[in-house]
């Protein structure tokens, strides 16, 4: 099977969600199903059908998380020597050469990506353009409307 890169924080977040689903949500749903069964006829019992649907979603998410964790290649960049090269898990500050605008991103796995938190997927075009580059290297990102040139200002393994 293919392994997918994941940061330590991403793996911990998935493990916490899995624990919550198994220890909190699953028992709540089981109790809701038992309670709904006591109300009689199951064919016309909306509470029962809603609880069963919730159970399906919960079990599906549990299986999905377990599969992701079993195929995860957890990478801890804090244990690697910082040689200034952009790698998976690195926090990278880049500057738009034309405008001077600076932005910082962390390169993470697909499931961890959240642009609002400045977490970009390793498979995103900007991350693919940065991987392997070093401080002071420039790269060009092609967007639908133009090409933008960036320079790598800082690389941190935090």
Image (cartoon, helix red, strand yellow):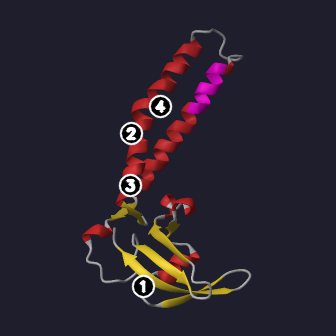
123 up-or-down from 99: above or below:
above
- The residue where tag 2 is placed is 19
Dot 4 or dot 1, earlier in sequence: 4
Please report the residue visible at 54 percent of the width from the left and 31 percent of the height from the top. 55
Please report the residue visible at 31 percent of the width from the left and 66 percent of the height from the top. 76
Q: Mark number for residue 11? A: 3
How crowded pointer 3 is (Cα within 10 Å; few <14, some 14-19, many 20+) is rated as many
Please report the residue visible at 56 percent of the width from the left and 63 percent of the height from the top. 115
Decide if residue 138 is on the left or right side of residue 76.
right
Dot 4 or dot 2, earlier in sequence: 2
Q: Quadrant of the N terminus?
A: bottom left
Q: Are marks 4 and 2 in contact (CB under 8 Å)?
A: no
Q: Where, by quadrant of the figure, is residue 18 drawn?
A: top left
Please report the residue visible at 53 percent of the width from the left and 89 percent of the height from the top. 139
- The residue where tag 1 is placed is 132
Dot 4 or dot 3, earlier in sequence: 3
Q: CA distance from mark 4 to mark 3?
A: 20 Å
What main secondary structure does the magenta stretch of the protein show? helix
Residue 84 among magenta residues = no
Q: Position of residue 104 (x, y in %)?
A: 49, 72
Dot 1 or dot 2, earlier in sequence: 2
Q: Position of residue 45 (x, y in %)?
A: 68, 17
Q: Are marks 3 and 2 in contact (CB under 8 Å)?
A: no
How crowded pointer 1 is (Cα within 10 Å; few <14, some 14-19, many 20+) is rated as few
Q: Are marks 1 and 2 in contact (CB under 8 Å)?
A: no
31 up-or-down from 140: above or below:
above
Residue 41 visible? The answer is yes
């Amino acid at each position: 099977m293919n392994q997918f890169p994941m940061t330590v924080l991403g793996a911990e977040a998935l493990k916490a969600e899995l624990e919550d689903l198994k220890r909190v949500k699953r028992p709540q749903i089981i109790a809701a199903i038992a309670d709904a069964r006591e109300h009689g006829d199951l064919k016309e019992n909306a509470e029962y059908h809603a609880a069963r649907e919730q159970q399906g979603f919960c079990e599906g998410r549990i299986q999905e998380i377990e599969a992701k964790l079993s195929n995860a290649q957890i990478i801890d960049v804090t244990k690697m020597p910082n040689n200034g090269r952009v790698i998976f898990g690195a926090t990278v500050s880049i500057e738009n050469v034309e405008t001077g605008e600076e932005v910082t991103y962390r390169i993470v796995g697909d499931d961890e990506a959240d642009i609002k938190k400045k977490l970009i997927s390793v498979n995103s075009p900007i991350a693919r353009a940065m991987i392997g580059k070093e401080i002071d290297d420039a790269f060009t990102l092609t967007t639908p409307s133009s090409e933008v040139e960036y320079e790598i200002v800082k690389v941190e393994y935090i």
